[in-house]
Image: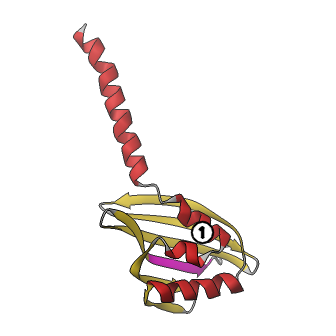
Amino acid sequence: MKSVNIIPVVLITLSSLTTRAQDQAKIPGGIAIAIKAGNAAELSKYMNSTIELLLLDKEDFYKKNVAETILKDFFAEYQTKDFTIRHQGAKNDAQYAIGNLKTEKGDFRVYFLLKKVDQELLIHQIRIESDNGK
């Protein structure tokens, strides 16, 4: 009789652990919204003070405000139509996401890496490259 009572407790415990693991891999929704809107200022709210930016012909570490300006110029030239996160995951204190950005001038693959800084999840790397597969 005791083993019958333990089974629901074990199932509930496993379910909550699975839910917690999935929650850890969730990228803040504001990031996807900012990219979809082509809003560099909003996106910069999620950036670390210095980020690695790999954007078409630019590849370097930039201060947050410089990265915001570069992204603003990109979004001005490539007006966004849609952005969808295709995959996301987590390992240790880092999280990442890969998505597809559709613009009026073509499609791009977007990758970003976030790490915890003082309990806050911040973008440390953004990679935007042409999606030649479409």
Residue 34 falls in image quadrant: bottom right
**Quarter of the figure with the C terminus:** bottom right
Q: Amino acid at mark 1?
A: Ala
Residue furthest to the right in view is 104
**Quarter of the figure with the N terminus:** top left
Q: Which residue is drawn at the image coordinates 39% and 81% (left, top)?
A: 49
**Magenta residue check for 78:** no
Residue that numbered label 1 is attached to = 34
Residue 123 falls in image quadrant: bottom left
Whether residue 79 is visible: yes
The colour scheme used here is secondary structure
Q: Is residue 115 above or below residue 4?
A: below
Q: Is residue 110 above or below residue 20?
A: below
Q: Which residue is drawn at the image coordinates 65% and 78% (left, top)?
A: 132
Q: Is residue 30 above or below residue 10?
A: below
**Of helix, strand and loop, which one carries label 1?**
helix
**In this rendering, position of residue 84 left or right of residue 9:** right
Whether residue 134 is visible: no
Image coords of residue 75 (percent x, y): 66, 81
Residue furthest to the top in view is 1
Residue 54 or 121: which is nearer the viewer? 121
Image coords of residue 23 (percent x, y): 42, 49
Q: Which residues are magenta?
A: 125-130
Residue 120 falls in image quadrant: bottom left
Image coords of residue 51 (percent x, y): 42, 82
Q: Which residue is drawn at the image coordinates 35% and 27% (left, top)?
A: 11
**Magenta residue check for 127:** yes
Look at the magenta stretch and give its main secondary structure. Answer: strand
Residue 28 or 118: which is nearer the viewer? 118
Residue furthest to the left in view is 2
Image coords of residue 54 (percent x, y): 50, 85
